[in-house]
Image (cartoon, rainbow, N blue to C red):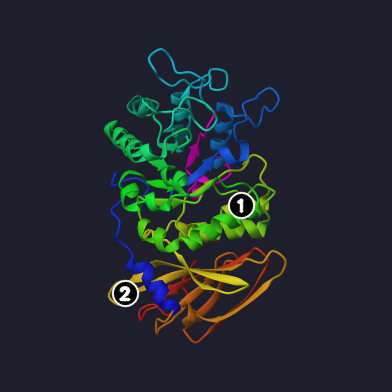
Amino acid sequence: MLFSAALLIVGCLGSTVGLENGLARTPPMGWMSWTIFWCQIDCIKYPGKCINERMYKDMADRLVEDGYKDFGYNRVHIDDCWMEMKRDKTGTLIADRDRFPSGIQALSRYMHAKGILLGIYEDYGNKTCGGYPGSQYYLEKDANTFAEWEVDYLKLDGCYAEEDDMAIGYPAMSDFLKKTGRDIVYSCSWPAYLEDEPEKVDYNVIGKYCNLWRNYGDISAKWSSIQKIIDYYTENQDKLIPAAGPGRWHDPDMIVVGQNTVTPDQSRTQMSLWSIWSAPLIMSNDLRVIKPVYKKILQNSLVIAVDQDPLGIMGRMIFNNSDFAVYLKPITPVDTDKNLYSYAVVFFNRNTDRSSVVSIMYGQLGLNNPLGYFVQDLWENQYLGLKRSIDVYVATIPPTGVKMIKATLAHKFFIDTPTA
């Protein structure tokens, strides 16, 4: 029964035609300001936490100097509240003159000199969520402005917009971005504003215009928020899985690992499930003061590799009981002749007050290759050996925590433990 679920993931591939601008072939990785600094604009009272060019430069510096860029985190994203409250006389957006005295183009060039890409925020409505000028009636002008500023990514929110207009406005901005001739990854909040009207969400359409999209409410740095997103993605996985793939990604929102209100176990859970879902790994934390335990979680190359797997398959929950759930994602390497995949597997203990013991045969997970799989614990970086379908995986999972393994397909030419 479980293996049929694994096959269903693979069988869904290719059913959606995505935006073919050649961008975001793997889920974007980087840093974004919103969930850690929100719309803080008082740079006198909060000099290290306000939305200004110095803060974004600091985060770019930390991505490079603290090694995050080496693990794939290569973007810094400006969120809301970066603008003046009014456009100029020509209708062009203006970065706040006090907080961004050098302007956005200078900030882009600062990033690019370090090998970092710059993302920016706008809103399809007449105002942003923070009350700043929106892009309604200015879509083409704003697209051209962002291209002139050498921006690499646009997050287009949907506050103060008519829901029925979104099916016109979001595709229109996609077309205007393409016409600029600049490579700009396009992140839409389109389906997030239709959460209460799921019949209006057609990912076959959304995926033609957007590289990634939000489809649920904003995350906050607490376990209850992460849990709600996990529940939403699990409950809606049958609709979500066929829509995801290279160049088109569901975005369950920012990685809050590094904010001290989320425990290390909960942080590993978020990183694991976001990676199983092939979700963007866009951090929102203060990289200048992050604790080593969280930095280590964010820089786990084995887990990141699952997220960035080139197949781009979104995994699914395949097993569920009162204590824990199991999520499975087909990954490379693949035996195309036999239609056999390697897999990443997450065992998630949803209990908040007690550990859970997992004891399950690999065959029950759908791992039925006769030659077996080389199994590795991705958080402990420990090889568990060559396992076949009748072997049993046993582990104790802490409350709100996970175990995550990779099962690499063995074949007749490869019966030794692979190197890391």
Q: How many labels does the image show?
A: 2
- The residue nearer to you, when weighing 229 against 18, is 229
- The residue nearer to you, when weighing 254 against 228, is 228
Q: For label 2, count other residues whose C-alpha is less than 10 Å away and answer few (under 14), some (14-19) or many (20+).
A: few
Give how far across and how far down residue 377 sits, in percent: 56, 69
Relative side of 47 to 247, left or right: right
The picture quadrant where one finds residue 296 is: bottom right
Residue linked to disc 1: 225
Q: Is mark 2 on a helix, strand or loop?
A: loop
- The residue nearer to you, when weighing 196 against 81, is 196
The residue at the point 64 percent across, 52 percent down is: 294
Q: Is residue 66 magenta?
A: yes
The range drawn in magenta is 65-81
Q: Is residue 300 visible?
A: no
Q: What residue type is labelled 1?
A: Ser
Q: For label 1, count other residues whose C-alpha is less than 10 Å away and answer few (under 14), some (14-19) or many (20+).
A: some
Give how far across and how far down residue 136 sits, in percent: 39, 28
Q: Is residue 398 visible?
A: yes
The residue at the point 30 percent across, 77 percent down is: 338
Question: Mark on residue 66?
Answer: none
Q: Is mark 1 on a helix, strand or loop?
A: helix
Farthest residue to the bottom: give it: 390
The picture quadrant where one finds residue 332 is: bottom left
Residue linked to disc 2: 339
Farthest residue to the top: give it: 89
Give how far across and how far down residue 287 sits, in percent: 62, 42
Q: Which amino acid does label 2 sit on?
A: Asn
Give how far across and how far down residue 373 sits, in percent: 45, 77
Front disc: 1 or 2: 1
Q: Does the magenta stretch include residue 17?
A: no
